[in-house]
Image: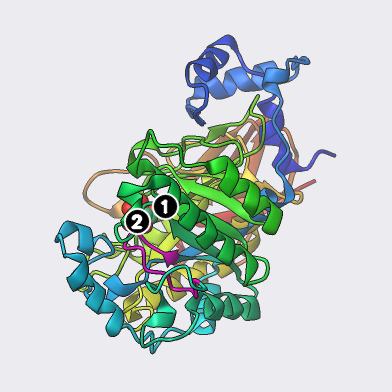
Amino acid sequence: MIGTCDRMEMKGTAMNNTRRHLLKQTAGAAVLLSSSLAFRRAAAQTADSAGADPDDTIPVPEPRVARFERLAFGMFIHWGLYSQLGRGEWVMNREKIPKEEYRKLQTTFTAADFDGRAIARTAKRAGMKYITLTSRHHDGFSLYDTRGLTDWDAMHAPANRDLVKDFVEGCQAEGILPMLYHTTLDWYQESFENDFDAYLDYLHKSVEVLCTHYGPIGGLWFDGNWSKKDADWKEDRLYTMIRRLQPEAMIINNTGLKQRGKLGHPEIDSTTFEQGRPTPMDRRGLPKYVSGEMCQTMNRHWGIGVNDFAYQSPKEIIENLCACRKVGANYLLNVGPTATGRIPDYEAAALARSGDWVRMHGEAVHDGKPYALESKGRDFALAAGGKIYLFIHDLDLGHHHGPKPEVSGAGPRTFAGLDRQVGKAEWMDNGESLKFKQQGDRLTVTCKKFPYGTNTVVRVACLTIK
Ligand code: GLC
């Protein structure tokens, strides 16, 4: 039997002319698939007649990419000198703080509360499986020992320790995969503006340090190429070095707010959807399988904003995680530690609460792959290991005032396009069975209201295939 999780891709092994045309029009970019019924039908209809058109072949993910997709939910950490000011990581640039002035922040940077292991535990509690830490952000300051490349690092601050080392070891001790964010643009190094080749040498040497002194790392997450769009960033050289020194590391390079989901250099392993909704990717005909990741702030700043109260609730975090998994993308949710390196209380609490939900649905969230069933509203299905998971939204909203969701309240929910026989269906939160009816390729499950005392925001039903 073909694994159920492969089925969506199987279905998509042929495409009609309209889709091919669209693909060609947007060559080089991750193609956004319409979720329209028409396209899904067309894809399903043509699947059986899939011929040998190489344009239609879906590449197999390399092991590091397959592993990354199963991590599903990660913690982003923006932390650095700027955290002492509490006004976001762009404060130097936004407030035009002169370098001489900004430099003083190094003399007060103690990192007294930064504890890689404690952070890894917080992530684990949240059901997260990886963490991406800003080893160096745009202000150019490194949290790691740059080994003589610059004094603008944590070793030359009162902290006087290699914080990346502490982070990586803490993650390893907790079974969390450590990844490192590294800026490519730099407000501190004059060579960035005056001598770009020299700057790139410095940048590449900096990354080489990260690749050689911390054991295997899960990935490198670059950010800033968008600041000099037409420059030659010598990506070939950088990525070749990473592949040589860290063959299992994901290579990611943030495309920024304006080019979400765009594919870049051929070595890139995942596209980014910064602060956006990830869209399904059409991988047919691509030279390699590229995954997707949405990164998002928990309030409106990446680096701590002490006066930013616009926080996501656990409900929103759950919904955002689901929206990512719906299309097979990872969700990288940010925290902004305090001046001294502690995750703020509300952030840790919101993560712990969301983590309760993730734990309840672990296998569905981490292993589930998009499964093309037609449904209404935000409902969707994932599949893994002989199980199909239905993610049912808006179950309790029937009695609410205000804008009505497209699907609301208790009652039947229909999913079309199923070619398996369902043996049983049960809610993952309490094991209770759901009534279901299968007619042709249509499955209708009867959803009751949440039992009194429960509201899991998105309720997940697990279908066991006969
Ligand atoms: C943007 C910002 C940066 C942040 C990043 C995270 O590129 O410049 O501050 O680190 O997004 O995705």
**Image spot of residue 451 (x, y percent):** 47, 66
Q: Quadrant of the N terminus?
A: top right
Q: Is residue 169 left or right of residue 412?
A: right
**Disc 1 to disc 2, C-alpha distance:** 9 Å
Q: Is residue 83 left or right of residue 56?
A: left
Residue under label 2, please give it: 186
Q: Is residue 283 above or below residue 292?
A: above
**Magenta span: chief secondary structure:** loop
Magenta-drawn stretch contains 142: yes
Which kind of residue does numbered mark 1 sit on?
A: Tyr
The answer to which of 22 and 258 lies nearer the viewer is 258
Given this view, does label 1 or label 2 mark the residue nearer the observer?
1
Examine the image and state in which quarter residue 373 appears.
top right
Q: Could you tell me the amino acid type at mark 2? A: Asp
Secondary-structure class at tag 2: loop
* Vertical order, 241 against 160 (above or below): above
Q: Indicate the position of residue 216 as horizontal and vertical percent values.
A: 67, 66
Q: Which residues are magenta?
A: 135-146
Question: At 67% across and 51% down in the image, what residue appears?
Answer: 243
Image coordinates of residue 189 in percent, x first then y, are 34, 59
- Mark 1 highlights which residue? 199
